[in-house]
C-alpha cells in the first residue's frame, strides 16, 4: 500500500496517442523538378547535345556542301600524324606552364599586400586586377605596340643597352613567349584575389605562435602561409590549366591569322578554328575538339587525385 502510495508498482496512465496525419500525395513532390527543369534543359541543349554531336562528327568526314560520312577513327590517326597539330599541343603545354608561373608570383604579391598597416593596399589590388577584367582584344592591341620591333618600348629599352631587340611577334619562338608573358600578366590579378581570400582564412594565432618560437617572416611564409594556402593554390592550378588549354583570343588578337609564324605558334583551339572555319574540315576539327576535352579532363582528374598528398585544410 505504501509502495502504491509512493508510486512504486503503480500502473502508469497510458499516454494518449497522437493522431498521425495521413500522407497525402501533394504537388510538392514535383514542383522542385519544375523549377530546375529549365536549368537541366539548358545543360542538355547547350552542353551535352553539342558534346555528343562533336563526338559523333569526329568519326566522320564532311563534304564541301555538307553531309557527314562515317570514316571511323581516320581523323584521329590523321591527327597523330599531323605535325601542325602535334606542334599546337606542344605550344599549348608551354603556354600553360608559363601561365602557372603566375601562381607563385601572385602568392608572394598577395602576402606582401596582406601585411598589417600597409597603406593603399586596396588600390594596389585594383591595379593588379584591372588587366583581368579588361577585354583581351583591347589589351592585345596595346601590347602589339609594346612588342613592336621599330618603336616598341621593350626594344627601345634594349637599344639603350646596345642590344637590338627582335621582332617579338614575328619570330617563331619569341611570338609564343610574347603571348605567354601577356597571359601571365593578365592572370596575376585574378590569382591575387583568390589568394587574398585564402589569406583571410588563416588564423592569426598561428603567426603569433610561430613568432614566439622565433620564426622569421620568411620562415612563416614557407611554413605557415604557403601550406595553408594550398586549397586556394589547388583551385588556381585547376583553373589556370583549363584556361591555358583554351588559349585562342590572345593568340588571335596579338598575332593574327595571317602572321607567318602562326602555323608554328598556334594553340590547340586555334588549330580547331583553322580546321573548322578556314579549311571547312569539320570532322577533323571535331577530333581536335575531343582531344582538347580529353586532355583537360585527364589533367583535371590527375590533379584531384594528387591534391590529397599536398593540399592542407585548416581544421
Image (spheres, grey):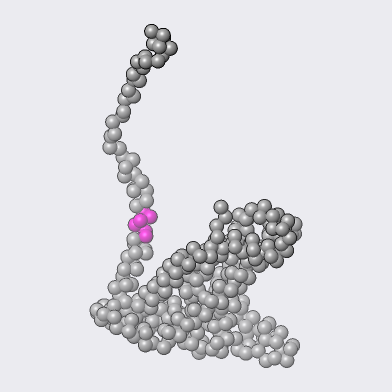
314 to the left or right of 7? right
Quarter of the image that includes the N terminus: top left
Kindly identify the residue that appears in the image at 47 percent across and 73 percent down: 246
The magenta stretch spans which residues?
A: 38-43
Residue 249 visible to an observer of this rendering: no
Per the picture, the main secondary structure of the magenta-coloured stretch is helix
Residue 55: x and y in percent read 32, 72
Q: Nearer the viewer, residue 91 or 309?
A: 309
Q: Nearer the viewer, residue 149 or 47?
A: 47
Find residue 231 and report its image quarter: bottom right
Queried whether the magenta region covers residue 83, the answer comes back as no
Kindly identify the residue that appears in the image at 62 percent across and 90 percent down: 166
Q: Residue furthest top?
A: 1
Residue 146: x and y in percent read 64, 81
148 to the left or right of 294? right
Residue 52: x and y in percent read 31, 68
Residue 189: x and y in percent read 61, 66
Q: Residue furthest front?
A: 2
Kindly identify the residue that appears in the image at 59 percent across and 76 percent down: 182
Q: Nearer the viewer, residue 11 or 31?
A: 11
296 to the left or right of 145? left
Amino acid at each position: 500500500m505504501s509502495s502504491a502510495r509512493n508510486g512504486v508498482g503503480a500502473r502508469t496512465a497510458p499516454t494518449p496517442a497522437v493522431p498521425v496525419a495521413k500522407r497525402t500525395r501533394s504537388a510538392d513532390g514535383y514542383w522542385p523538378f519544375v523549377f530546375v527543369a529549365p536549368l537541366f534543359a539548358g545543360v542538355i541543349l547547350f552542353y551535352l547535345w553539342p558534346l555528343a554531336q562533336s563526338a559523333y562528327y569526329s568519326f566522320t568526314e564532311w563534304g564541301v556542301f555538307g553531309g557527314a560520312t562515317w570514316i571511323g577513327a581516320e581523323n584521329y590517326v590523321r591527327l597523330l600524324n599531323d605535325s601542325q597539330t602535334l606542334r599546337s599541343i606542344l605550344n599549348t603545354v608551354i603556354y600553360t606552364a608559363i601561365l602557372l608561373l603566375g601562381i607563385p608570383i601572385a602568392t608572394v604579391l598577395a602576402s606582401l599586400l596582406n601585411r598589417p598597416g600597409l597603406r593603399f593596399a586596396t588600390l594596389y589590388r585594383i591595379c593588379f586586377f584591372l588587366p583581368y577584367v579588361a577585354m583581351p582584344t583591347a589589351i592585345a592591341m596595346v601590347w602589339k605596340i609594346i612588342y613592336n620591333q621599330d618603336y616598341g618600348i621593350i626594344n627601345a629599352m634594349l637599344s639603350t643597352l646596345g642590344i637590338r631587340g627582335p621582332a617579338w611577334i614575328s619570330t617563331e619562338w619569341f611570338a609564343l613567349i610574347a603571348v605567354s608573358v601577356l597571359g601571365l600578366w593578365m592572370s596575376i590579378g585574378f590569382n591575387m584575389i583568390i589568394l587574398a581570400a585564402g589569406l583571410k582564412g588563416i588564423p592569426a594565432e598561428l603567426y603569433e605562435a610561430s613568432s614566439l618560437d622565433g620564426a622569421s617572416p620568411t620562415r612563416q611564409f614557407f611554413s605557415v602561409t604557403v601550406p595553408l594556402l594550398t586549397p586556394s593554390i589547388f583551385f588556381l592550378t585547376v583553373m589556370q590549366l583549363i584556361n591555358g588549354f583554351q588559349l585562342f583570343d590572345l593568340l588571335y588578337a596579338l598575332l593574327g591569322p595571317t602572321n607567318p609564324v602562326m602555323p608554328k605558334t598556334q594553340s590547340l583551339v586555334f588549330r580547331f578554328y583553322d580546321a573548322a572555319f578556314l579549311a571547312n574540315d569539320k570532322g577533323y576539327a571535331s577530333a581536335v575538339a575531343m582531344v582538347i576535352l580529353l586532355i583537360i579532363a585527364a589533367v583535371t582528374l590527375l590533379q584531384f587525385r594528387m591534391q590529397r598528398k599536398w593540399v592542407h585544410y585548416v581544421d
